[in-house]
């Protein structure tokens, strides 16, 4: 059962004579131009010398929210100035009342000094929408990441996945920021060598919390005339070692939306990736060849359940990762008009939009007239408009995702995996038993075939210490095919097509190369899907707009083309993304059902972050919900 979020309200920014009043904590705080220079001085004289990031592969700092934008800018500055900086710097920020992008821009322009304005603008261009959940900003070619946990702090503190090397919990401008949480909530993520910066008056609380986490406090440094302290502590545990510390090579089985999404995310992190797919013999777009347009639309439910939260995270990741992709991959960022209907997940859509109180820039209810204006054609139903809806060309997207010197595409089918215990590696074997490749990290991302590869590799069971053989991934047993088709309608037959994506019982997409995609059919356990007149008639019957008789006639005359494919679906319709508990180094990214576009980047970044030891851009409970077990 998923928990629901309380409504997330943005901070309010009230202009004052010398700056702003920012009410993003229980106590409003003043932010002035002097705050920046004051904080800068605090970093110069105290903080920068306490952070032990020199020479490290990665360093993760957690920050309490207030004025975090100033901290981000200063941390970036001092990290870059450091004589031997860590290679990758990760910042984790908790915010209960985040600043909207507009307010950040206003505040940034007024208060931050000229020399950081370019960085302020860069931050603003990626500044997240005020939505509950995890957000991530990638800067400096991914060497500087900011993970923003938006939501009730106590809940989010229990729900992150990160190993924190330093905490900045109070600063020279915000002496009382720890009012709500305890040090224990924060320090549970402490790495074996940690630095905690906070108020001197909290020293004994801090020492108690460190002790509970098994950390022994060592050197203490004082700053700002004895008001702040930096406590260095360590535990007997070894520092975590991540796969990326040993080698950055991976083997991916399957080059569809799942496999290419993972390969892309790893290549961005400097990995060398080999992708295996027999379909590469025909085209680099693998199984999506001929699928000219599809829709990415976030889901919404009145209880903000796992699927909705995951879908929001997936849509946000896709927007972040594909922001510079060309029209050949993303023909239009046109939004989706999801029309209300009597059944399915959209039944309570309008109520859900009201209940969640998400910003209108994410989703808003529209009446029939509003819907017609958005779609550019008459619609007699109300609905919700998601501006994050994207029209994607899956063929073009896969080509772009795989277009990297770090990615090698191999036209071959993998039949099973074998653990070479001596070499400590996984071997990928073809049906004739020849070894095609071997490596430490294997991502199985081949849709429905994921199940047969797991079975052939003997990975569906595990042997307990007692010798008992037990099912290892029972939920994967429900993986089954759901075939379907879409039709490609000449735009001239539908008055040019809609201006935005229209979703309802079926979906109707804006034209791509003068063809509008209408979809779709859903046939459980169909192994060999194909296009058919019957399927096209079923699609026409689902269309929420009036269509011309010419189109029906064209269908009858078999004049309309289309595309058919198969979805791999699991009971509960969640994807499976994660490492096998019983086979280290083997990961699954599959069961994407009807939402391959939503899960593609998210899975890549979840797997990439785990392999690299980065803060994971997804909450812990969601990671559990999609884990293979
Ligand atoms: C008609 C239809 C319309 C759809 N519309 C949308 C939409 O609008 N939006 C959306 O988000 N999603 C849509 N989907 C769903 C989307 O297509 C899937 O979610 C997506 O294809 C899943 O990607 P995948 O990579 O997991 O699997 P697949 O696309 O099935 O790709 C798996 C790849 O693995 C390869 N492979 C298989 N076995 C092996 C092996 N043994 N060794 C090596 N390689 C192997 C295959 O050749 C294939 O290329 C639609 C699906 C259908 C059928």
Image (cartoon, rainbow, N blue to C red):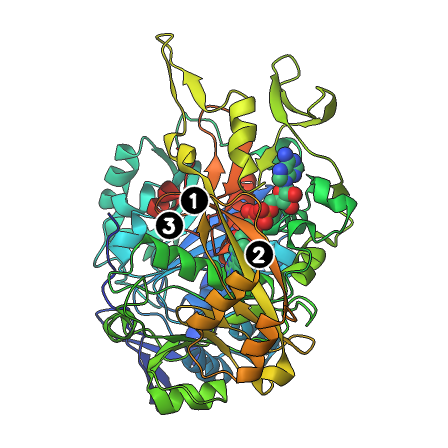
Q: Is residue 551 above or below residue 525?
A: below
Q: Nearer the viewer, residue 604 or 137?
A: 604
Q: Nearer the viewer, residue 94 or 350?
A: 350
Answer with mark 2 or mark 1, whichever residue precedes in sequence. Answer: 2
From the top left corner, tell me how far across and down residue 300 is, in percent.
Answer: 34, 65
In what element is the residue under mark 3? loop
Query: Can you identify the residue that label 2 sits on?
Result: 144
Question: 385 left or right of 485?
Answer: left
Query: Can you identify the residue that label 3 sits on?
Result: 619
**Label 2 crowd (10 A; few <14 / some 14-19 / many >=20):** some
Answer with mark 2 or mark 3, whichever residue precedes in sequence. Answer: 2
Q: Nearer the viewer, residue 499 or 264?
A: 499
Residue 136 in view of the camera: no
Residue 2 in view of the camera: yes
| Real-space Cα separation, disc 2 to disc 1, in angstroms | 15 Å
Question: 361 left or right of 354?
Answer: right
From the top left corner, tell me how far across and down residue 277 is, in percent.
Answer: 69, 40
Single out the mark in the foreground, 3 or 1. 3
Query: Can you identify the residue that label 1 sits on?
Result: 162
**Label 3 crowd (10 A; few <14 / some 14-19 / many >=20):** many
From the top left corner, tell me how far across and down residue 547 is, in percent.
Answer: 50, 82
| Real-space Cα separation, disc 2 to disc 3, in angstroms | 20 Å
Task: Tell me the residue at 58%/83% (across/down).
Answer: 550
From the top left corner, tell me how far across and down residue 13 is, in percent.
Answer: 34, 82
| Real-space Cα separation, disc 3 to disc 1, in angstroms | 10 Å
Where is residue 623, by image quadrant?
top left
Q: Is residue 354 above or below residue 277?
A: below
In what element is the residue under mark 1? loop
Task: State how many labels appear.
Answer: 3
Single out the mark in the foreground, 2 or 3. 3
Where is residue 398, by image quadrant?
bottom right
Q: Is residue 426 above or below residue 120?
A: above
């Amino acid at each position: 059962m998923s928990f629901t979020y309380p409504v997330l309200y943005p901070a309010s920014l009230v202009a004052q004579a010398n700056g702003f009043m920012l009410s993003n904590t229980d106590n409003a705080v003043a932010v002035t131009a002097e705050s920046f220079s004051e904080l800068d001085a605090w970093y110069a004289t105290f903080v920068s010398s306490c952070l032990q990031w020199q020479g490290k592969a990665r360093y993760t700092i957690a920050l309490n929210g207030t004025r975090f934008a100033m901290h981000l800018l200063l941390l970036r500055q001092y990290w870059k100035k450091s004589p031997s900086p860590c290679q990758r710097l990760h910042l984790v920020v908790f915010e209960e009342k985040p600043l909207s992008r507009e307010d950040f821009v206003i505040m940034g322009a007024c208060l931050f000094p000229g020399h950081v304005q370019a960085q302020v603008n860069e931050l603003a261009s990626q500044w997240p929408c005020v939505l509950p959940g995890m957000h991530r900003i990638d800067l400096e070619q991914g060497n500087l990441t900011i993970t923003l946990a938006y939501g009730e702090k106590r809940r989010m503190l229990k729900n992150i996945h990160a190993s924190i090397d330093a905490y900045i919990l109070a600063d020279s401008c915000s002496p009382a920021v720890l009012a709500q949480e305890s040090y224990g909530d924060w320090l549970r993520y402490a790495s074996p060598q940690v630095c905690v910066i906070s108020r001197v008056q909290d020293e004994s609380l801090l020492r108690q919390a460190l002790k509970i986490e098994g950390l022994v406090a060592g050197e203490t440094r004082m700053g700002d005339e004895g008001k702040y302290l930096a406590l260095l502590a360590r535990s007997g545990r070894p520092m975590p070692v991540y796969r990326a510390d040993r080698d950055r090579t991976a083997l991916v089985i399957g080059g569809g939306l799942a496999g290419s999404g993972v390969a892309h995310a790893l290549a961005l992190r400097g990995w060398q990736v080999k992708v295996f797919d027999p379909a590469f013999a025909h085209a680099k777009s693998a199984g999506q060849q001929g699928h000219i347009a599809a829709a990415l639309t976030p889901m919404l439910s009145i209880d903000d359940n796992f699927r909705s939260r995951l879908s929001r995270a997936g849509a946000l990741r896709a927007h972040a990762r594909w922001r510079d992709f060309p029209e050949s991959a993303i023909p239009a960022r046109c939004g989706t008009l999801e029309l209300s209907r009597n059944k399915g997940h959209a039944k309570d859509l309008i109520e859900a939009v009201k209940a969640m109180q998400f910003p209108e820039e994410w989703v808003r209810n529209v009446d029939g007239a509003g819907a017609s204006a958005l779609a550019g054609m008459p619609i007699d139903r109300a609905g919700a408009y998601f501006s994050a809806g994207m029209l994607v060309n899956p063929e073009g997207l896969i080509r772009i995702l795989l277009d990297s010197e770090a990615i090698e595409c191999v036209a071959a089918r993998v039949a099973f995996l074998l653990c070479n215990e001596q070499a400590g590696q996984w071997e990928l074997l073809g049906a004739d038993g020849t070894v095609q490749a071997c490596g430490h990290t294997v991502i199985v991302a081949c849709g429905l075939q994921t199940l047969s590869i797991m079975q052939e590799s003997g990975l569906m069971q595990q042997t307990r210490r007692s010798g008992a053989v037990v099912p290892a991934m029972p939920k994967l047993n429900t993986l089954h095919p759901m075939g379907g088709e879409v039709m490609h309608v000449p735009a001239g037959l539908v008055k040019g097509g809609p201006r935005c994506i229209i979703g309802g019982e079926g979906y109707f997409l804006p034209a791509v190369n003068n063809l509008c995609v209408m979809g779709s059919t859903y046939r459980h356990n169909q192994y060999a899907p194909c296009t058919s007149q019957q399927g096209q008639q079923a699609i026409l019957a689902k269309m929420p707009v009036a269509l011309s008789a010419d189109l029906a006639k064209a269908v009858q005359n078999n004049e309309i083309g289309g595309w058919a494919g198969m979805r791999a679906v699991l009971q509960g319709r969640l994807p499976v993304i994660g490492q096998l508990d019983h086979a280290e180094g083997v990961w699954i990214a599959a069961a994407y059902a009807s939402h391959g576009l939503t899960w593609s980047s998210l899975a890549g970044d979840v797997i990439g972050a785990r392999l690299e030891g980065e803060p994971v851009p997804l909450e812990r409970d969601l990671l559990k919900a999609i884990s293979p077990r």
